[in-house]
Image: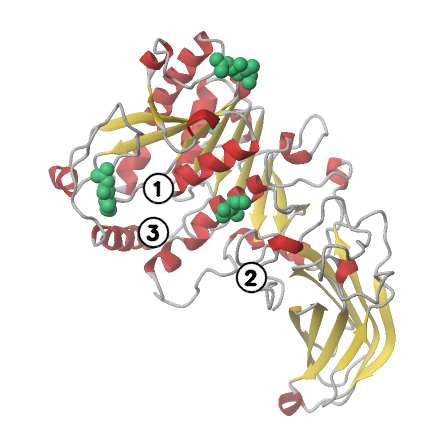
Amino acid sequence: MPWDRTFIFCTVLLVYTVSQVVGSEEKQDDGLCADLRNTTWQEYRQRQTKLQVRYLLMTRENVDCPQRFHQESFTTKTSHFNASRPSKVIIHGYRALGSKPLWVKELAKAFLVAQDVNVLVVDWIYGASFAYNLVVESYKEVALQISVLINQLQNHGCKLQSFHLIGVSLGAHVAGFVGTLFEGKLGRITGLDPAGPLFKGADTYDRLDPSDAQFVEAIHTDTDYFGISIPVGHVDFYLNGGKDQAGCARSRFPSMYGYVICDHMRALHVYMSALNASCPLVGIPCSTYEDFLKGNCVTCEVFQGACPRIGLSENSGINVSPIPREQKIFLLTTSSAPFCAHHILVKLEVSVLDKSAEVEVTLMTGKLGTQLQLRLQTDTTVYRSVVAHPAALCELDSIKIKNTGVRLYRQGDVHVKSVCVSEVPRFRNKKPVCVNNFNVRRNAPWSHDFVQVRPAAGRPPGRGKTAPRCECPPGASGRGGGRPAAGRRSGGAGAR
Ligand SMILES: *[C@@H]1O[C@H](CO)[C@@H](O)[C@H](O)[C@H]1NC(C)=O
Ligand SMILES: *[C@@H]1O[C@H](CO)[C@@H](O)[C@H](O)[C@H]1NC(C)=O
Ligand SMILES: *[C@@H]1O[C@H](CO)[C@@H](O)[C@H](O)[C@H]1NC(C)=O
Ligand SMILES: [Ca+2]
């Protein structure tokens, strides 16, 4: 990890945030709804380095009005904490000066919609929150304080197994260290793009790892900057390969947020979307992203067929025992909520070419199209690529192939022996759908309508709720209300 770059980014982030700070004194209103604290400009100037940890409690009884929570809360009748419910503990990460993590309440609410739980939000500030390394040094202190609280909760009847810690960025390693302190007996830890700088080479004692809880999962979205690239849980979801996310600006400085932190925070937004359960976010175990994109991994045999999914299902939906560790799971997403995409493997076989060529394959469902650019070489005849399509395979209306790059390469017709599409993970040993033996000429795009895929083909897809459902993988209802905004070229990662 290039440290200097990270430092520059933190500084940029800091300057950006400082410019947004309206210096305001912190108020403490125990009677009213509680809120996360701001770090003030004054505190920044005083370089106050004292660690302050506080807790907010949200339950279904006070969704919109968080309560302060502390040891004395047990003796007050007004606390909504209920020891017979499971508890979610949300731990934020590095906080730049003045920035309150606004997503915290959104995440808490998403949990409360999904489950009847206590949500404890850990509000921790290090006075010098501008210095990432200083904060990194103090994360164990935060963990220690959280463990004291969990101990007290245990004394009031909470089971260690009933705790689920959710840590964002640096917060993931805080959660990991809390888990270490309880010798891995906590129920679950979810790391949302666990912080990478200074942690990648760290001992498992010092970072999140599978021994920290009975089930540890992580979602990776920015492994080339702020996130950690190595697997740290039982299952590790790498979204779009884990480095760059669709819809996050790649150009320089279109917006500071977009450039600096969009990839990193995507893990959180995808997780929240999964809690909403509007559509499934299912991944495939594979050793590398390249193998996954080439369609070399199409089953979940290692989990006896059940593919892991992001969300609240027990052990991410896998039920093998013992649970494998550090399994890399890959999935593609769309660029905006709810992020779900169907993985479609496109396999193209052509006759030997005497000059290299370029073709563009487009999958169409209604008006939603996913494009795949392929450079055809003279020494290869079979091309495989997994793309993210907003609809299921059985909802494909047509496939188009265009012979591009005509002027550049001056190649003639491309003879296609077969073009096949299949859904990943492969469902019920379904055979790929293929079209065989045709030519794609220079100026005439080829197109094929998939009437055979959907039995009742008279009806256009997706119009009206009564449209007959084709046979799709379980729970694969990605359409309807949850249609991604950016269907076109949504398979950015796969479409090279
Ligand atoms: C925190 O800072 C923001 C500006 O960054 C300001 O709008 C808000 O009122 C402050 N909140 C508190 C509780 O001081
Ligand atoms: C605590 O939660 C349990 C289980 O959800 C419920 O049965 C019980 O009534 C709750 N107690 C209070 C005081 O709300
Ligand atoms: C979750 O669903 C609610 C309402 O159904 C919506 O307002 C919110 O934006 C959704 N959040 C995400 C992250 O999809
Ligand atoms: Ca650990």
The residue wearing badge 1 is 101
Would residue 349 appear left or right of 273 to someone viewing this image? right
Q: Residue at x 44, y 49 (%)?
A: 264
- Say which label, 1 or 2, has the lower sequence index: 1
The amino acid type found where label 2 is placed reads: Ala
Ranked by sequence position, the earlier of labels 1 and 3 is 3
The quadrant the C terminus occupies is: bottom right
Measuring from the top left, give residue 18's x and y in whole percent: 21, 50
Task: In the rendered structure, find residue 438 and report the number of the disc placed on it.
Answer: none
Q: Which residue is mark 2?
A: 485
The kind of residue on which mark 3 rests is Thr
10 Å crowding of disc 1: few (<14), some (14-19), many (20+): some
Report the coloring of the rendering. secondary structure
Instruction: Report the residue at 50% width, 54% height from top.
Output: 243
Indicate the secondary structure of the residue bearing disc 2.
Answer: loop
Q: How many marks?
A: 3
Circle 1: element type: loop
Query: 59 or 92: nearer the eye?
Result: 59
Does residue 270 appear in this view? no
Q: Secondary structure at mark 3?
A: helix
Q: Is residue 383 above or below residue 278?
A: below
Q: Position of residue 24 (x, y in %)?
A: 16, 41
Residue plotted at (76% across, 90% down): 412
Residue wearing tag 3: 6
What is the crowding at mark 3: few (fewer than 14 residues within 10 Å), some, or many (at least 20)? some
- Image vertical order of residue 73 relative to residue 357, above or below: above
Q: Look at discs 2 and 3 and give the one toward the viewer.
A: 2
CB within 8 Å, label 2 to label 3: no
Mark 2 and mark 3 lie on one chain; the one further toward the N terminus is 3
Q: Is residue 465 above or below residue 285?
A: below
Q: Amino acid at mark 1?
A: Pro
Quadrant in the rendering for residue 151: top left
